[in-house]
Image: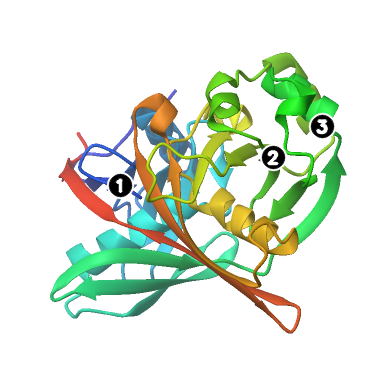
Amino acid sequence: MNELKTEGIPFYIVDVFAESKYSGNQLAVVISRDKLNDEEMQRIAKEMNYSETTFITSVENYDVRIFTPEVELPFAGHPTVGTAYILQTEFMKEKAKTMALNLKIGQIPILFKYKGEILSETWIEHREPAFSGYFTPDLIADVLSIDENDIDGRFRIQEVSTGVATIIVPLKSLDVIKKIYVNIEKYTQLIQNTQAKSILVFCAETYDKRNDLNVRFFADYYGVPEDPATGSANGCLAAYLLKHDYFGKNKIEIRVEQGYEIGRKSLLLLKAREKDGKFYITVGGKVILIAKGTLL
């Protein structure tokens, strides 16, 4: 295997959807400027061992590629948010309200919100959701090592995508959330026949009373046993909540906690509305710079 030629390439470490420093979902942003080939980017992502690592191949054009430790992704939420934050705070000379990143999936719009001169929230606009097949409670319960009755039977389990598909599972309580253990053999059998390779579970009971939902997210297929904060899957969740009339409204603005069970408390802000049969979905939160340096 050839030696990596990475000397002098800048990188940044950020916490995305973080309630405070050293919470949220960590992300490495590498300023590769087309100096790295696919194999080198994949190897760096594996070495970083975060859920995703992003590579800015062109700072000027906002061209970005996203890798998990195992594969390249066409789109992912928290890497898109964290990368836009780095471009705005470290490279842009003027304070911007919007930006569009060029990802494998296409252009993804970004919105910035400020408190005075400080960038306080970074938001990602999701694509129109696609709703696919339904799943029986007994099948999903076996994958999650829970009882069929632990699933909230008022709402169906469904595959949803706003760029990357995930299976959305409504649960009854926080106690159920806490006891989930993914059966890898049954999970592998499940995803062989689905576009979605990940599972998001949620319930209306929360650790923090200020929040509206608790979420856990599992994606072993991508090398991510559990993600502390996921912007793409929460966009799918927002679409699901509207379609299934979970809150009894055609417009939602909620706070979602994630990562509590693995010690990385995260906070995601979801806004969604439906008008004339079309969904408008944005997911946002806080990004915190943790470190910066150069690759050796």
- The residue at which mark 3 appears reads as 137
**For marks 1 and 2 on the same chain, the one whose residue lies earlier in the sequence:** 1
> 78 or 247: nearer the eye?
247
- The residue at which mark 1 appears reads as 18
**Does 85 sit above or below residue 5?**
below
**Does 159 sit above or below residue 84?**
above
Q: Amino acid at mark 3?
A: Pro
Question: Colour scheme used in the picture?
Answer: rainbow
- The residue at which mark 2 appears reads as 169
Question: Where is residue 37 shown, x and y percent of the image?
Answer: 44, 45
Quarter that holds the N terminus: top left
Whether tag 1 and tag 3 are in contact, CB under 8 A, the answer is no
**For marks 3 and 2 on the same chain, the one whose residue lies earlier in the sequence:** 3
Q: Amino acid at mark 2?
A: Val
Please, what secondary structure does the residue beneath circle 1 have? loop
Question: Where is residue 268 shown, x and y percent of the image?
Answer: 42, 53
Q: Is residue 19 visible?
A: yes
Q: Residues within 10 Å of mark 1 (few under 14, many from 20)?
A: many
**For marks 1 and 3 on the same chain, the one whose residue lies earlier in the sequence:** 1
Question: Where is residue 202 shown, x and y percent of the image?
Answer: 59, 41
Q: Residue furthest bottom?
A: 276
**Residue at the image point whose x is 69% and y is 20% from the top:** 146
Whether tag 1 and tag 2 are in contact, CB under 8 A, the answer is no
Report the label total.
3
Q: Amino acid at mark 1?
A: Ala
Q: Is residue 188 visible?
A: no
